[in-house]
């Protein structure tokens, strides 16, 4: 009888270990991560489909890696995304990265946003970033985001701070490291 109890306890432990992990409270999606959330495209080209599967038509193609997209829905391994222009479609989860990037979104008729030396309105301007410029987002705190800009033929690599309101790819008042 003790050996039967032993095997029963081993079997019970194995079943508990194999049980799927439940999504976080209030998250009714496959990943268990919050929705909506921002991520970026991992590679290029990436087919964006009209539905969650390869049997669905291609709506458009991303030709640049690292672009920010907002995940609004999940179905199995497919993620419904929204791009900055409001266009929506489905991408396989393996084609997305948790790396945070953002596009500069100048407001009030402006065509550029300041990249500052520190997180303050009165900080020196390191560079002016044009509307639609792609930046890597390192962290966001107190309405400011620490960003980096890759080296281009016209400019060196830079780091600095951009007001959160000047970026598409982060939520207002979002805080993260």
Image: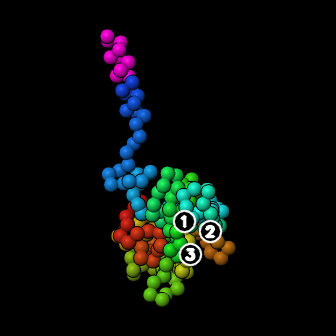
Q: Name the image quarter holding residue 22.
A: top left
Q: Nearer the viewer, residue 131 or 72?
A: 72
Q: What residue do we see at 35% from left, 14% from top?
A: 4
Q: Nearer the viewer, residue 163 or 90?
A: 90
- Of tags 3 and 2, the one toward the viewer is 2
User: Image check: 125 left or right of 5?
Assistant: right
- Tag 3 secondary structure: loop
Q: Position of residue 71 (x, y in %)?
A: 47, 62
Image quadrant where one finds the N terminus: top left
User: Image check: 23 left or right of 137?
Assistant: left
Label whose residue precedes the other's in the sequence (3 or 2): 2
The region drawn magenta spans: 1-10
Q: Main secondary structure of the magenta part?
A: helix
Q: Which mark is residue 60?
A: 2
Q: Which mark is residue 19?
A: none
| Residue topped by disc 3 | 133
Few, some or many C-alpha atoms within 10 Å of disc 2 (few <14, some 14-19, many ≥20)? Answer: some
Looking at the image, do the residues carrying marks 3 and 2 touch, with CB atoms under 8 Å apart?
no
Q: CA distance from mark 2 to mark 1?
A: 8 Å
Image quadrant where one finds the C terminus: bottom left
Q: Does the magenta run of residues contain 5?
A: yes
| Residue topped by disc 1 | 89
Q: What residue do we see at 32% from left, 12% from top?
A: 2
Q: Is residue 78 above or below residue 22?
A: below
Label whose residue precedes the other's in the sequence (2 or 1): 2
Q: CA distance from mark 1 to mark 3?
A: 23 Å
Q: Nearer the viewer, residue 79 or 169?
A: 79
Q: CA distance from mark 3 to mark 2?
A: 21 Å
Q: Name the image quarter holding residue 11.
A: top left
């Amino acid at each position: 009888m003790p050996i039967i109890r032993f095997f029963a306890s081993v079997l019970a432990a194995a079943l508990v270990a194999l049980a799927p992990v439940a999504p976080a409270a209030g998250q009714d999606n496959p990943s268990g991560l919050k929705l909506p959330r921002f991520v970026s495209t991992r590679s290029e080209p990436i087919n964006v489909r009209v539905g969650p599967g390869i049997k669905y038509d291609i709506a458009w193609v991303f030709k640049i890696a690292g672009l920010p997209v907002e995940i609004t829905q999940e179905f199995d391994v497919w993620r419904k995304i929204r791009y900055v222009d409001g266009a929506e479609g489905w991408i396989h989860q393996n084609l997305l990265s948790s790396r945070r990037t953002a596009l500069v979104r100048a407001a009030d008729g402006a065509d550029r946003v300041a990249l500052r030396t520190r997180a303050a309105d009165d900080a020196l301007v390191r560079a002016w970033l044009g509307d639609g410029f792609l930046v890597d987002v390192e962290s966001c705190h107190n309405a400011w985001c620490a960003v980096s800009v890759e080296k281009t033929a016209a400019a060196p690599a830079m780091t600095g701070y951009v007001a959160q309101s000047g970026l598409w790819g982060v939520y207002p008042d979002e805080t993260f490291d």
